[in-house]
């Protein structure tokens, strides 16, 4: 409803468009809830621009770029090595600041919309992520493997969900969140680009959190591990006993 | 039907897990073992991370063994004194095993260590079972000498205790060592250890078969409870939702297996179980030597 109301408002006032900001964007939800039935979700980013959106190369129209990033966490990348015919985990590199989630979507790929130095500085695109291994002397293969595996897990995505434009000024994009997303605060940046320059920028936030039973189980396991362990023992013993009672009668 | 595992932080097919639980439960009912040695590798094969599979496997073994222990206790087939001796060793072993597991996790070698332990233990136990049962099948018609047990160096050890139900008067050192070894394996492999404990009690300690199963279940229940507690404190990798799904399938499967097991002869059962154990070992061995699809792995830093 919120979506429709905002879009209706924007559409109904074309005359006052110039008085309005050149970019308005919003998220359909600001909460993603991980329940016991969670299989992944998606976040709908939508909004409108003051001038018509045009994705034709060289045209004077506005363009939109959406970047979402999740909480940063340290990651270890290990290379598999063969020792005496067995494959085992060999040398490793630790990357201290790895965004758990990163997705970018635009009316065109970011490297076509912006000049290279500008794009690098604003960190738009997977190749611009500041992934430096701790110690700094890890081989570039580790960084490449991190990029590759994160994309395979669906946690990092570039241009997988293109921006849909309707009526020239309304845009929306759906950013996929796989079932393995980490909990925490996520930021979504929406950029308005005109002739290779960023004209307007809006930052939105959504939160991924566990709710219900999944949240309670995880909270107990983290905060009171001993109590959780005892509860697991009691539950497993009870389930085993209950099963034998049911099947003896049956 | 997808279910989100709150500790593993991933979503899995609940029907697949119920199916695995049922299948393993059926086999464990058929052969009279806990089935942890099948459960943990199968979980790893379905994509559950090794630490979660091992810790949750120990917890599900506890659940699966409780009902068996209760029925054996009622029939008086549990040598509690022997069980307690094994348990002292088992507790010490599982404390050490969980420390070892946490160390391996820090080094990033859990997958290798778990697979390696499984291959060595399952390979040797499976081979022994197949050899012994084949011998028994071939010798079935000959009359063998019935001997209680042989005396060797083990019986000269000090601290002798009388185990009335087991009709033994032996030192407490060998049962404690057996319990200690099984405790370590229980923590690292996520198994109860019944499939190793039973032959160790028969051939090593010379216990009568009647009390072996009940007494091994006694040790398995308490050691797996200890492992569950220690794993949740130390590595935080016991997933209770996963455990319940596996138990729901396992408890029902075990009843069908037990009904079918009653129709098979002892040697034939042991022969089939030996083959199964060898097959799991071979599968894990193949997993270690085959060229991996990915040259790299990533995981959150500890």
Image: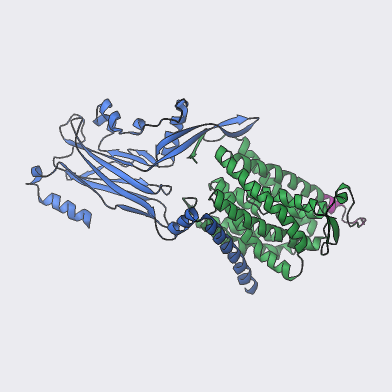
Residue A192 appearing in the image: yes
Classify residue A177 as left or right of residue B176.
left
Where's residue A97, x and y in %?
40, 36
Residue at position x 62%, y 51% in the image: B190
Q: Is residue B297 above or below residue B36?
A: above
Which quarter of the figure has residue A72? top left
Which quarter of the figure has residue B267? bottom right
Q: Which residues are magenta?
A: B133-145
Classify residue B57 as left or right of residue A188.
right
Where's residue B154, x and y in %?
85, 49
Closest to the observer, B135 or A158: A158
Classify residue A22 as left or right of residue A73.
left
Q: How many marks?
A: 0
The shade of chain A is blue
Where's residue A193, x and y in %?
20, 35
Residue at position x 32%, y 33% in the image: A125
Which quarter of the figure has residue B260? bottom right
Assess whether residue B136 is covered by the magenta stretch: yes
Instruction: Give the chain letter for green.
Output: B
Where's residue B27, x and y in %?
67, 57
């Amino acid at each position: 409803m919120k979506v429709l109301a905002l879009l209706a408002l924007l559409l109904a006032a074309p005359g006052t468009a110039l008085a309005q900001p050149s970019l308005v964007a919003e998220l359909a939800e600001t909460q993603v809830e991980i329940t016991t039935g969670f299989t992944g979700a998606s976040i709908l980013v939508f909004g409108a621009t003051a001038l018509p959106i045009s994705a034709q190369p060289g045209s004077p129209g506005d363009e939109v770029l959406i970047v979402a990033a999740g909480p940063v966490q340290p990651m270890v990348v290990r290379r598999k090595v063969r020792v005496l015919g067995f494959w085992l985990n060999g040398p490793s590199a630790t990357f201290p600041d790895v965004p758990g989630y990163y997705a970018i979507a635009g009316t065109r790929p970011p490297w076509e919309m912006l000049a290279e130095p500008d794009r690098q500085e604003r960190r738009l695109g997977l190749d611009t992520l500041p992934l430096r291994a701790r110690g700094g002397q890890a081989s570039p293969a580790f960084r490449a493997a991190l990029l590759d595996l994160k994309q395979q897990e669906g946690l990092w995505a570039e241009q997988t969900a293109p921006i849909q434009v309707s009526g020239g000024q309304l845009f929306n994009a759906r950013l996929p969140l796989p079932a393995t997303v980490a909990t925490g605060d996520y930021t979504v940046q929406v950029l308005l680009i005109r002739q290779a320059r960023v004209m307007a920028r809006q930052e939105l936030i959504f939160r991924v959190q566990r709710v219900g039973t999944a949240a309670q189980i995880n909270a107990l396991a983290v905060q009171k591990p001993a109590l959780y362990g005892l509860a697991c023992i009691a539950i497993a013993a009870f389930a085993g006993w209950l099963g034998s009672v049911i099947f003896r009668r049956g | 039907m997808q279910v989100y595992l709150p500790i593993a932080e991933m979503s899995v097919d609940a029907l697949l897990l119920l199916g695995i639980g049922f299948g393993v439960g059926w086999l464990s009912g058929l052969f009279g073992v806990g089935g942890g040695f099948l459960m943990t590798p199968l979980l790893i094969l379905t994509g559950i991370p090794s630490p979660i599979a091992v810790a949750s496997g120990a917890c599900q073994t506890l659940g699966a063994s409780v009902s068996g222990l209760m029925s054996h206790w009622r029939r008086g087939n549990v040598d509690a004194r022997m069980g307690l001796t094994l348990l002292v060793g088992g507790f010490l072993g599982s404390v050490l095993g969980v420390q070892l597991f946490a160390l391996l996790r820090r080094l990033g070698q859990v997958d290798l260590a778990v697979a390696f332990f499984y291959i060595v233990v399952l390979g040797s136990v499976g081979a022994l079972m197949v050899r012994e049962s084949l011998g028994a099948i071939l010798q079935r018609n000959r009359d063998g000498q019935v001997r209680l047990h042989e005396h060797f160096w083990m019986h000269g050890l000090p601290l002798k205790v009388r185990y009335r139900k087991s009709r033994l008067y032996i030192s407490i050192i060998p049962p404690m060592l057996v319990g200690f070894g099984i405790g370590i394996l229980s923590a690292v492999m996520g198994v109860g250890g019944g499939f190793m404990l039973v032959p160790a009690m028969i051939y090593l300690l010379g216990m009568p078969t009647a009390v072996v199963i009940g007494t091994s279940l006694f040790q398995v229940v308490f050691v797996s409870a200890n492992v569950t507690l220690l794993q949740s404190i130390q590595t935080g990798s016991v997933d209770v939702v996963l455990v319940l799904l596996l138990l729901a399938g396992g408890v029902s499967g075990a009843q069908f297996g037990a009904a079918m097991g009653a129709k098979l002869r002892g040697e034939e059962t042991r022969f089939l179980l030996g083959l199964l154990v060898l097959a799991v070992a071979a599968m894990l061995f193949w997993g270690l030597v085959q060229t991996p699809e990915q040259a790299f792995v990533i995981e959150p830093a500890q």
